[in-house]
Image: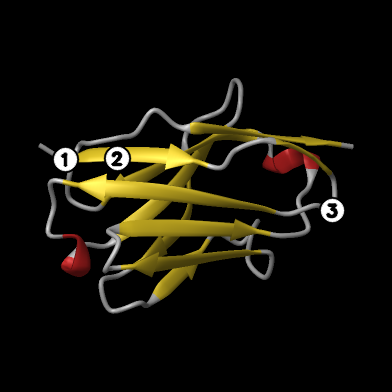
Amino acid sequence: QVQLRESGGALVQAGGSLRLSCAASGIAFSINAMNWYRQAPGKQRELVASITGGGSTWYADSVKGRFTISRDNGKNAVYLQMNSLKPEDTAVYYCHAQGTSAWGQGTQVTVSS
């Protein structure tokens, strides 16, 4: 059973930084691509960043240059470093294991202007 647990969300002022963490279990983590999604109120869930087992990354245009996804295969963890945060980054952030239907409970990020 795949389990994902996000943490690190908070209320932060515009221009600030946050680091989100996701702990995964129940998957062959080191070879599994991992994703970060977000969902703002009234909007569809969107893919923000992705990282393959080999460390290749992809970013949505809206976060490119500000967010960095990384992983620690020894800890079965994936991270999202978010810098230069904007009010439009406000959302619940979820991690997701590629190829599974498992989602964590999400972590709330609120950016005040």
Left or right: 11 with respect to 75? right
User: Do the residues bearing badges 2 and 1 touch, measured as CB atoms within 8 Å?
Assistant: yes
* Callout 1 secondary element: loop
For disc 1, the neighbor class at 10 Å (few under 14, some 14 to 19, many from 20) is: some
- Counting from the top left corner in percent of width and height, residue 61 is at 61, 62
Name the residue: 60% across, 30% down. Answer: 40
Left or right: 110 with respect to 107? right
- Counting from the top left corner in percent of width and height, residue 98 is at 24, 53
Q: How many marks?
A: 3
Look at label 2 and name its amino acid.
Leu
Look at label 3 and name its amino acid.
Gly
Look at label 1 and name its amino acid.
Val
Name the residue: 66% across, 35% down. Answer: 10
Q: Going from the N terminus, do you reach mark 2 or mark 3 first?
A: 2
Compute the Cα span from label 3 to label 1. 34 Å
- Counting from the top left corner in percent of width and height, residue 43 is at 56, 27
Q: Going from the N terminus, do you reach mark 3 or mark 1 first?
A: 1
Q: Which residue is mark 3?
A: 15
For disc 3, the neighbor class at 10 Å (few under 14, some 14 to 19, many from 20) is: some
Q: Quadrant of the C terminus?
A: top right
Left or right: 4 with respect to 62? left
For disc 2, the neighbor class at 10 Å (few under 14, some 14 to 19, many from 20) is: many
Q: Which residue is mark 1?
A: 2
Compute the Cα span from label 2 to label 3. 28 Å
User: Do the residues bearing badges 2 and 3 touch, measured as CB atoms within 8 Å?
Assistant: no
Name the residue: 35% across, 38% down. Answer: 5
User: Do the residues bearing badges 3 and 1 touch, measured as CB atoms within 8 Å?
Assistant: no
Q: Which residue is mark 2?
A: 4
Compute the Cα span from label 2 to label 1. 7 Å
